């Protein structure tokens, strides 16, 4: 499942999957609380194998729907392309 | 609001100052005779009075517990029944002695207090902030997103809402960190512990915590 799809499932609102990529995940946007972010990152890890919190110390990835989608995609490619 | 503060050290004393200044009535207690707090409450002005721990708990609609963790078993449970209790505690083994349940991470320090006060509505807050920053860095005039964050854990949503309002009055932004079982995310050693950050960054640091 795509990151927007996972996000929509975690917040329980299918319309969230169709929001613009530049929608902020925190203040000024979806205003996710830490509990929801924890669940979101856990679902992303389960679905894609990418552990965002572990890989991104600043978590700039959590700025918007688009930055998170791109971060997960980039990490997934890096891992899939890595030898061994 | 009537507020009890049990523990007149750095955090307890600072909160007494901030809450009385915001117009609340504060009963302040330490582990000794209330007479030992005469100078302290005189400096706080007419909104404050000294009390025993039991009387401070009985007085407050909301009661802050800011005593060392090792001292909580001496608190009488009965006057805390039904009260919103804000635990500012941290487990420091060098000070408190080893507590196996906390060393094994099978409990949280605030969970232990909640077990000791079974009828209280226990929250955890004010444990991550340096008292001097709490004293000096509240910005009641600033937008919530620009203020420093104070994580709040707990299972009782209406109690959290009351504390969130108080935190707002003293110029900080409360950030919901989850349930009491999740409160390890703001314990010593966690990324948000001691971090002076705005609410968004606090959410990120809380999400980043590993046990």
Image: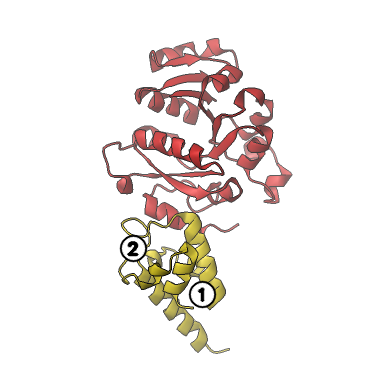
Q: Chain of mark 2?
A: A
Asked if badge 1 and badge 2 are on a common chain, one would say yes
Give the residue at mark 1.
Answer: A50
Colour in which the image shows chain A: yellow
Q: Position of residue B61 (x, y in %)?
A: 50, 26
Residue under the point 37% across and 62% down: A25
Label 2 environment density (alpha carbons within 10 Å; few <14, some 14–19, many ≥20): some
First in residue order: circle 1 vs circle 2? 2
Q: Which label belongs to residue B99?
A: none
Residue under the point 38% across and 14% down: B45
Q: Chain of mark 1?
A: A
Label 1 environment density (alpha carbons within 10 Å; few <14, some 14–19, many ≥20): many
Residue under the point 69% across and 48% down: B103
Which chain is drawn using red?
B
Q: Circle 1 sits in a helix, a strand or a loop, which is it?
A: loop
In this view of the protein, can residue B106 be seen by the observer? Answer: yes
Tag 1–tag 2 contact (CB < 8 Å): no
Q: Which label belongs to residue A24?
A: 2
Q: Residue A63 versus residue B66: which sits nearer the camera?
A: A63
Dividing the picture into quadrants, the one containing residue B124 is: top right
């Amino acid at each position: 499942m795509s990151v927007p799809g996972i996000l929509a499932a975690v917040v329980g609102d299918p319309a969230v999957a169709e929001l613009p990529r530049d929608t902020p995940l925190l203040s000024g946007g979806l205003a996710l609380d830490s509990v929801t972010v924890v669940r979101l990152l856990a679902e992303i890890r389960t679905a894609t194998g990418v552990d965002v919190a572990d890989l991104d110390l600043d978590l700039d990835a959590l700025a918007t729907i688009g930055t998170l989608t791109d971060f997960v995609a980039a990490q997934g490619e890096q891992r899939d392309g890595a030898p061994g | 609001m009537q507020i009890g503060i049990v523990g007149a050290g750095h955090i307890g004393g600072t909160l007494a100052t901030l809450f009385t200044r915001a117009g609340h009535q504060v009963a302040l207690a330490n582990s000794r005779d209330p007479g030992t707090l005469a100078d302290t409450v005189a400096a706080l002005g007419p909104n404050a009075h000294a009390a025993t721990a039991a009387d401070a708990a009985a007085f407050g609609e909301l009661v802050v517990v800011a005593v060392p963790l090792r001292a909580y078993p001496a608190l009488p449970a009965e006057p805390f029944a039904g009260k919103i209790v804000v635990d500012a505690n941290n487990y420091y083994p060098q000070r408190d002695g080893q507590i196996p349940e906390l060393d094994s991470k099978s409990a949280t320090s605030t969970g232990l207090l909640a077990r000791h006060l079974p009828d209280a509505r226990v929250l955890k807050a004010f444990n991550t902030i340096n008292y001097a920053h709490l004293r000096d860095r509240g910005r009641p005039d600033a937008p919530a997103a620009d203020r420093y964050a104070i994580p709040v854990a707990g299972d009782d949503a209406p109690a959290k809402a009351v504390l969130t309002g108080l935190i707002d009055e003293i110029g900080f932004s409360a950030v919901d960190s989850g349930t009491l079982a999740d409160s390890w995310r703001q314990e010593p050693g966690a990324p948000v512990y001691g971090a002076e950050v705005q609410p968004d960054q606090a959410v990120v640091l809380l999400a980043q915590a590993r046990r």
